[in-house]
Every structure is written in C-alpha cells, then in structure tokens.
Image (spheres, rainbow, N blue to C red):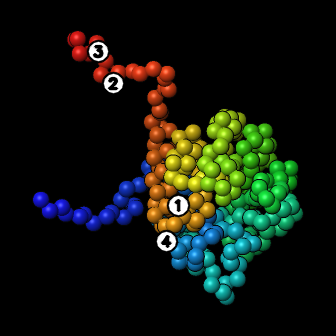
Amino acid sequence: MKSVKSKPLPPAAFAQPSDDDALVIGGVTLRSRLIVGTGKYRDFEETRRAVEASGADMVTVAVRRVNILDRKQDNLLDYLDPKRYTILPNTAGCYTADDAVRTARLARAAGVSDLVKLEVIGDPKTLFPDTAALIEASKILVKEGFTVLPYTNDDPIVAKRLEDAGCAAVMPLAAPIGSGLGVRNPYNLRIIMEVVSVPVIVDAGVGTASDAAVAMELGSDGVLMNTAIAGAKDPIAMATAMRHAVLAGRLAFRAGRIEKKLYATASSPLTEMIE
C-alpha cells in the first residue's frame, strides 16, 4: 500500500499556552513562558523567523551590541513588531554598576522600554555576574522607576536580596552563559523558588529542549535563552523545539509527577485481577 505524506502542521498547531496560566512580570502579562534573545543570528531576518517559531511574547535585545537606537540604519526593531512582542532591553557587556545603569537609562531615553534585563558581569572568562554590583544597580534602577529583571547566579541569598531591592523577577543561571550544559544545580534553583515570591526565570546554560523541560519541571516560572537557539544548526527548528519543551515542562509540573521509588509498582495491581 502506497504511503501518503501529510502536510506538516505549523508550530502553532502543536503548542498553545493555556490562557489560564499566564505569567505576569512587573505588570506585563505573557502567555508564553519562553523568553528569547536576539543575538548571534546570521541576520535580522533569521532572528525574526526564530522568534516567531519560538512563540515567545517577550524578546530581549542587547543595547550595546544590537542596533536598536539608530533608526537611520538597519534596525532589529524593524523586524520585531512592538505590538506583538514585549521588548526587554538588556545590559549585556556591562562590567560595572554605573555602566549598567547608564545603558538602561539610554534604552529608556530612546523610547525602547522601562523594562530592563540587568546584567553586571564580574569575570570575562566565565561571564558570572558581579552580584554586589548587581544588587547596587538594581536598587538605583528600581528607585528610578525601572522594572528590573536581574541575571544572577544560583545563590538563594542573592536572589532574596534582589527581591528585597524591588526587582520584579530573578533570573538565576542554570549554567554559564552559552555553555549548553543544562541545569547543573537543580537544588539551588528549587531553594530560590522557595525563598522568593517573585517569578523565577532560568537564564543561561540551556543547550537543548530537554534542558528547558527540566527547568520548567522543577517549577521555574519561565526560561530565557539565546545561544541554544541561535547557535543550533537549524535555529528555526530549535526554536520550535524549545517552544514545545517549555510548554511540556510546565504542563508536567502542574500535573504533578509520580513519586520516585526504588522498586517496581505494577501498573495493573494483582488485587484488581482477583476481584
């Protein structure tokens, strides 16, 4: 019998976030719990296609590295409809609190957003955050009316101090930026989720779809990624995979997994057969 190939369905046909499970960060409502970056793509058109395939509502852009301020040149924001996406400027590449604060102010002055993904890097090799400078910059920007989402390490104490500083969410790393190692310390992430009341977005270190699903199954409110998609052999396909993974991980978390046991438990109990 001759097989008939069916026409593949678009990504939207497979993964649709539930309307009753929206994520709210600083007054912004997001249906998708996947936040994607816009760096490292071959061109702005590939960026647009990957973002669309991801199903993300929020997109982060590096103020210092991507052209979003000069409207006279080819501009990333020409490819991302601000009516469709919430633009989240980030302070990537900043190594001091002053530099990060200045970059956030520049984005707001240019009319991009009052939101900011705050990054203050402490080491150029590992790209781990300078947490002391991060807390300092957070306090300044919160006082100036910014909605601050800080990229931090997986330290519950730092996460709590960032919440106390007024941050709208905390974004602990799963592993070093761009490493693709996946969730290295699930226990610290779980503690962070217990000690803070703001959303916890796992940021950095995701390498493939299973990593994103694990982060969501732990109870994370969302996942932010860039390299895992942009650096894939097929960024559009990987963006689609990440879309499904985040949705699946969230559904699994809400469903409640079975308890892990050392020994087997029969799927069809013997007592039922006897009765």
The reply, left or right, for residue 255 in relation to residue 72 is left
State the image coordinates of residue 130 (x, y, percent, origin top left).
83, 53
User: Of the residues shown, which amino acid type is indicated by label 4?
Assistant: Arg
**Where is mark 1, residue-wise?**
56
Q: Earlier in the sequence, mark 4 or mark 2?
A: 4
Cα separation between marks 1 and 3: 47 Å
Cα separation between marks 3 and 2: 9 Å
Residue 13 or 23: which is nearer the viewer? Answer: 13
**Where is mark 2, residue-wise?**
267
Q: Residue at x 55, y 49 (%)?
A: 212
Q: Answer yes or no: is residue 41 visible.
A: yes
Determine contact: label 3, label 4, CB under 8 Å: no
State the image coordinates of residue 98 (x, y, percent, origin top left).
87, 63
Q: Residue at x 46, y 40 (%)?
A: 252
Quadrant for the C terminus in the image? top left
Q: Tag 3: Cα neighbours inside 10 Å, few (<14), some, or many (≥20)?
A: few
